[in-house]
Amino acid sequence: MHEALDTPHKSITLNTRFRADTGPEAAHRSGAVEWAAGETAIIVCDMWDDHWCKGAAERVAELAGPMNRLLNRAREDGVFVIHAPSSVVEFYAGTEQRRRAQKAAFSPTPVPLSAAERWGTNWCWPDPDREPGLPIDDSDMGCDCPIKCEIREAWTRQNKQIEIWPQDAISHDGQETWNLLAERGIDNVILVGVHLNMCVLGRPFGIRQMVHLGKNVVLLRDMTDSMYDHRMRPFVDHFAGHELVIEHVEKNWCPSALSSDLTGEAPFRFAADDRD
């Protein structure tokens, strides 16, 4: 734990990428957005301490350190951080950060929150009016290991490399998340964490729900990963498959940006990603 920072709110600039068109002519477009840091939150999705898939767990461990540096830098600018380790928030019961989410003043949402359930929280399933099927087949749950790992609940808490500061909040609940944002006048939401094709899109604090609620949403595309097995459609490398999911989000839900816009450092890249 760290002492709260007392810093003046600044503005942050994100160089966003999106895909404005559909079909074979679709291409990346770009544009800069400037947000008041004090009106911006970063939500950390499911960066657990372990995972049933060994490869996924190793990638989360590799990502956690750079993500922690990102969060530290964002806090210096006045960005609010919400940790969302789904299904294990009870590990943090009684902490100041968990109580902050539970005690935030109730605020009605502009549209009803999704009431569907999956994997320990409410869930936002794909919206067929705006989102076609994913460009990858993750029906096998996406383990890319040479020998498929056994599915189990391996996680108990958030990865220890990601620090939780006194001014942060902890929640995996859609209403609590909305209350925290409303209480602080936050309209801008940055999503980081895993896994993009599943929880980052579908959780009650994830991309689909935040977009439905009218928030300005950006995905940091170098601060995420997907559950994709190269032996499944479209039969490409894991990281190429993950890039297809990023493009799916950019086309159908929200733009993406890089962590370097906030840190001034080089974007994160997984060591095993040897693509040009």
Image (cartoon, rainbow, N blue to C red):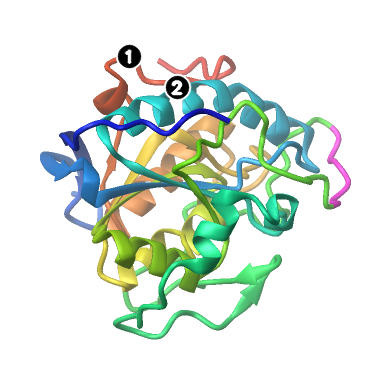
Task: Please provide the residue range marked out in magenta.
Answer: 147-152
Q: Quadrant of the C terminus?
A: top left
**Neighbours of disc 2 within 10 Å: few (<14), some (14-19), many (20+):** some
Tell me the residue at 61%/22% (across/down): 62
Label total for image? 2
Q: Is residue 68 left or right of residue 128?
A: right
Along the line of sight, the residue nearer the viewer: 200 or 25? 200
The amino acid marked with disc number 2 is: Arg
Judging by the rendered image, the residue that carries numbered circle 1 is: 265
Q: Are marks 2 and 1 in contact (CB under 8 Å)?
A: yes
The amino acid marked with disc number 1 is: Glu
Q: Is residue 48 left or right of residue 80?
A: right
Along the line of sight, the residue nearer the viewer: 178 or 78? 78
In the image, residue 151 lies in the stretch drawn in magenta: yes
State the SS at label 2.
Answer: helix
Q: Quadrant of the N terminus?
A: top right
Tell me the residue at 46%/20% (across/down): 269
Judging by the rendered image, the residue that carries numbered circle 2 is: 69
Label 2 to label 1, Cα distance in Å? 10 Å
In the image, residue 258 lies in the stretch drawn in magenta: no
The relative height of residue 7 versus residue 65 in the rendered view (above or below) is: below
